[in-house]
Amino acid sequence: MINKISASVADALSGVADGATVLIGGFGTAGIPNELIEGLIEQGARDLTVVNNNAGNGDTGLAALLKSGRVRKIICSFPRQSDSQVFDALYLSGKIELELLPQGNLSERLRAAGAGIGAFFTPTGFGTDLAHNPDGSAKETRVIQGKSYVLEVPIFGDLALIKAESGDRWGNLTYRKAARNFGPIMATAAKRTVASVHTIVELGELDPEVIVTPGIYVSHVVKIERSATQAGGFKGPL
Amino acid sequence: MIYPHRRSKEVLAQLIAQDIHDGAYVNLGIGMPTLVANHIPLGREVILHSENGILGMGPAPSADEEDFDLINAGKQPVTLLKGGAYFHHTDSFAMMRGGHLDICVLGAFQVSATGDLANWHTGAPGAIPAVGGAMDLAIGAKQTWVMMDLLTKAGVSKIVPVCTYPLTGMACVKRIYTDLATLSCSPQGLKIVSLIEGLSHAELETLIGLPIAAASPL
């Protein structure tokens, strides 16, 4: 029998290795799996590479993970925000490596990883400073049918931490509003995907027409009580 | 120089909104461009896209109605109109890169006469770079429009022969809406679309320091 429901966050995150690449869903405050990030801090893996759109807000969640000193490198599109002080301090003192990508290249590189695509040519970033590798070398470019493109390679995750709305024991997931963002793509791009959900339902209760992430992409599902805070992504009646 | 007929941000937003056609799919960049949403003429149906997976984005909710699972690219709470849809990030950026959006309106540090855009990074030492979806939007939408003041606070033209700030995209801007004039960009250079009252074609060329073609006759 398949049962991907984990009894606790700690169970779902056991054995994460040092040096892992961790994909973390969320955009701003929507869809950030804060409880899973706290679980990863607790679990203790070090020397991590983190992939997220941003680089943490305030002092909790991703910012707390960065502050714990366990992240060697972050791959993101928009690190600088009004409350990204934890990242800012680490970056300016040279304690964290940053790989900055256009947001669509970030999401498409994750998609490529999950879809078995070896590399792809994209027009985004052509002729800009971001058409360079982290070591400063120029990325390969090509003119195809008169248009200029940059070659981008996949970003594979060892672990993905995502926040969904409802899930079942096969790992099928639905999301809520714009908290969906990177979740469905990151789930495909990692060897192991842990999803937090607010509701666990019996098999068959999720309408197969509305399942966004089929369970094949999901390793563990953990129930987290809905939080009424901004960072929990919910306020007011459903 | 003081221009009594200089366009306020609201007037500029109104001008841009009037140029957005009925049925257009539009992405409004963070900052000043978001004002455009408040000025879409009544009876015109315009569908707003947000990079984080929303089509049919509506106005901000009233106080206490905020839902922090429903935010815009600037991370502010928004609403969804009837007929709106949610989708994941990779679909959202495929929509942008794939040329499905009719118009995007972006702010800018600099625009070149041939439509190169610089709006994501000053390149200053110690500045933390952040790009977000700017590069995807700039090259992806059918038309990229810029909304900005023509001059910096120091009085220097933001329309330049060649961008000195790091580029967002090459030859991607079609039109520049500014407080003093509206211009179009093409490989041939700049052309006047409209000027504020009290500013002549020659004065505009002096301010920008580049030749500008006259407006096409209507």
Image (cartoon, coloured by chain):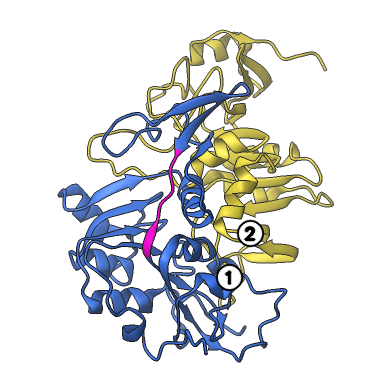
Counting every numbered tag in the picture gives: 2
Residue B161, image x, y percentages? 47, 14
Say which quarter of the image contains residue B126.
top left
- Protein chain holding label 1: A
Label 1 belongs to which residue?
A: A213
Residue depicted at x 70% and y 43%: B100
Magenta region: which residues?
A: A152-158
Residue depicted at x 63% and y 59%: B54
Check if mark 1's residue and mark 2's residue have beta carbons within 8 Å: no
The chain drawn blue is chain what?
A
Instruction: Looking at the picture, tell me which residue is in the foreground, B158 or A212.
Output: A212
Q: Which mark is residue B52?
A: none
In this rendering, is residue A167 above or below B16?
below
Specify whether A207 is left or right of A214.
right
Neighbor class of circle 2 (other Cα within 10 Å; few <14, some 14-19, many 20+) is many
Q: Which mark is residue B54?
A: 2
Instruction: Looking at the picture, tell me which residue is in the foreground, A61 or A80.
Output: A61
Specify whether A205 is left or right of A36.
right
The chain drawn yellow is chain what?
B
Q: Amino acid at mark 1?
A: Thr
Instruction: Looking at the picture, tell me which residue is in the foreground, A192 or B111.
Output: A192
Specify whether B5 is left or right of A65.
right
**Secondary structure beneath label 1:** loop
